[in-house]
Image (cartoon, helix red, strand yellow):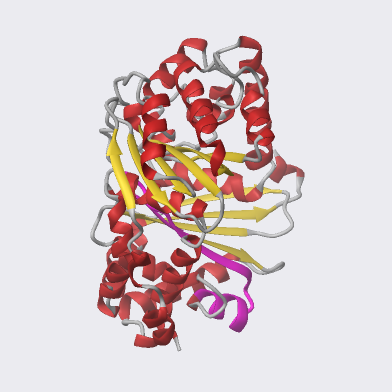
């Protein structure tokens, strides 16, 4: 069945026609025409995230995700959203360890306005003290909701703080609470100048546009923005982990939580595709190994998940288990560890390998059905892998992954010495709450 699905998928995303240009100020521009609907997407990928911060200013990249919607020289406070919505568009943004990304979707006849809006806030973002303090409060409240009052967020933060001893991936993208309150005006201006330089940005335009016209508009609005010194290279490399690390959090909660993390290479490493297949085989869907074992067969958990995200520096292979009420997390951990050992000792069957590869390709091609999905994929491949054209090689790269490769990466990375385990234990006692 899965082999049939794999063979029926479109070849290499039909090699999307993409015009790639580097503007005189160093900004990288990708344009893909798609005239299926009269809309367009404009995505801006800034190579600045929590890895470019330092103790004392953690969370500052995420802060600008908020500040960039609060007015500049030409378009004042709230005008970015007002003008966007007035012309039928929508927008969003996200910050990660490596990137801050701004996403815009709109009728294609509004492209010139959208580029003007983006150029205004890149070049002349307003640093109004009142707005800064207001957004500081918004971010502090967001941290309380997503970390302090979230069992998942709190445990994930503690896991990363234990998994990394040197590299900036140790601290949370949203920042430590004390740093959020301490950013100075100079901190903000310095970080903005460094991170939001045009030569630190990849811009992707997809949709019902004409390449020549879109390029001309980009030259008109984006190219005059002066380049800046890029963020300094992140020189620190995480030392090899020499033994298992453990974190236990005790707090009031309805259910326990179990997280497990392993250090893995960066996105450009040759093991990337094999790790993706390994993750899909382990925990993607109800027929995955961990779901069948922990949820269906042993009924130890209500859910299992895995995450292997691309990263500019060596990152993490992450597993999470939500044990059932009354189940000792140690039992769920023992079952999880047993399944990982099986992958280390035995090659997965051909049918399971085909299924995992097909699931990954189905997800990719589903994303590529939309102009937003194409913009996201092109930008991700350009930033993380250094060339958007590697998107068109995704099928071939996954097809090369063998059962032996899956076993090899499991043996190489998913072992006890390279493991960090974080457990949340429900505890309503006064002693546990202190």
Q: Nearer the viewer, residue 25 or 327?
A: 25
| Residue that appears at 74% across and 57% down | 254
Report if residue 266 lies within the magenta region: no
| Residue that appears at 57% across and 71% down | 331
**Callout count:** 0
Residue at the farthest bottom position = 1
Quarter of the image with the C terminus is top right
Residue 235 point in image, percent of width and height: 25, 33
Residue 377 point in image, percent of width and height: 41, 53
Please say whether residue 313 is visible from this viewpoint. Answer: no
Q: Is residue 202 above or below residue 274?
A: above
Q: Nearer the viewer, residue 263 or 146?
A: 146
Q: Nearer the viewer, residue 42 or 334?
A: 42
Q: Nearer the viewer, residue 105 or 343?
A: 105
Residue 236 point in image, percent of width and height: 28, 35
Residue at the farthest left position = 270
Q: Is residue 365 above or below residue 44?
A: below
Report if residue 299 lies within the magenta region: yes
Residue 255 point in image, percent of width and height: 70, 60
| Residue that appears at 55% across and 80% down | 292
Quarter of the image with the N terminus is bottom left
| Residue that appears at 57% across and 77% down | 286
Magenta residues span 290-318
Q: Is residue 124 above or below residue 118?
A: above
On the picture, is 110 further left or further right than 311?
A: right
């Amino acid at each position: 069945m899965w082999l049939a699905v794999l063979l029926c998928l479109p070849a290499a995303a039909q090699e999307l026609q993409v015009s790639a240009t580097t503007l005189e100020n160093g900004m990288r521009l990708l344009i893909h025409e798609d005239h299926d609907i009269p809309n367009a997407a404009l995505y801006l990928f800034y190579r600045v995230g929590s890895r470019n911060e330092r103790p004392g200013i953690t969370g500052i990249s995420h802060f600008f995700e908020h500040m960039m919607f609060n007015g500049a020289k030409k378009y004042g406070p709230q005008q970015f959203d007002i003008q966007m919505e007035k012309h039928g568009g929508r927008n969003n943004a996200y910050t990660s360890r490596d990137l801050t990304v701004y996403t815009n979707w709109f009728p294609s006849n509004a492209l010139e306005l959208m580029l003007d809006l983006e150029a205004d806030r890149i070049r002349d973002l307003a640093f109004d003290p009142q707005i800064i303090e207001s957004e500081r409060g918004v971010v502090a409240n967001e941290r309380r909701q997503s970390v302090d009052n979230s069992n998942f967020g709190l445990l994930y933060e503690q896991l990363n703080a234990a998994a990394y001893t040197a590299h900036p991936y140790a601290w949370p993208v949203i920042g430590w609470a004390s740093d959020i309150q301490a950013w100075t005006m100079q901190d903000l201006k310095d970080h903005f100048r460094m991170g939001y330089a045009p030569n630190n940005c990849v811009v992707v335009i997809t949709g019902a546009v004409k390449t020549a016209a879109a390029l001309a508009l980009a030259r008109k609005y984006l190219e005059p923005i002066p380049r800046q010194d890029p963020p300094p290279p992140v020189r620190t490399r995480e030392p090899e982990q020499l033994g298992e690390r453990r974190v236990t959090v005790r707090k009031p909660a309805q259910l326990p939580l179990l997280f497990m993390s392993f250090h893995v290479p960066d996105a450009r490493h040759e093991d990337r595709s094999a790790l993706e297949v390994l993750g899909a085989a382990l925990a993607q869907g109800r027929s995955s190994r961990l779901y069948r074992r922990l949820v269906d067969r042993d009924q130890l958990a209500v859910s299992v998940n895995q995450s292997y995200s691309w990263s500019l520096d060596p990152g993490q292979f992450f597993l999470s288990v939500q044990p059932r009420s009354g189940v000792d997390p140690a039992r769920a951990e023992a079952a999880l560890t047993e399944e990982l050992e099986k992958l280390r000792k035995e090659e997965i069957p051909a049918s399971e390998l085909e299924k995992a590869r097909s699931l990954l390709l189905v997800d990719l091609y589903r994303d590529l059905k939309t102009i937003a999905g194409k913009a996201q994929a092109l930008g991700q491949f350009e930033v993380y892998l250094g060339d958007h054209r590697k998107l068109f090689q995704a099928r071939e790269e996954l097809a090369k992954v063998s059962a032996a490769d899956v076993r090899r990466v499991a043996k190489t990375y998913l072992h006890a010495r390279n493991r960090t385990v974080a457990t949340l234990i429900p505890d309503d006692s006064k002693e546990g709450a202190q």
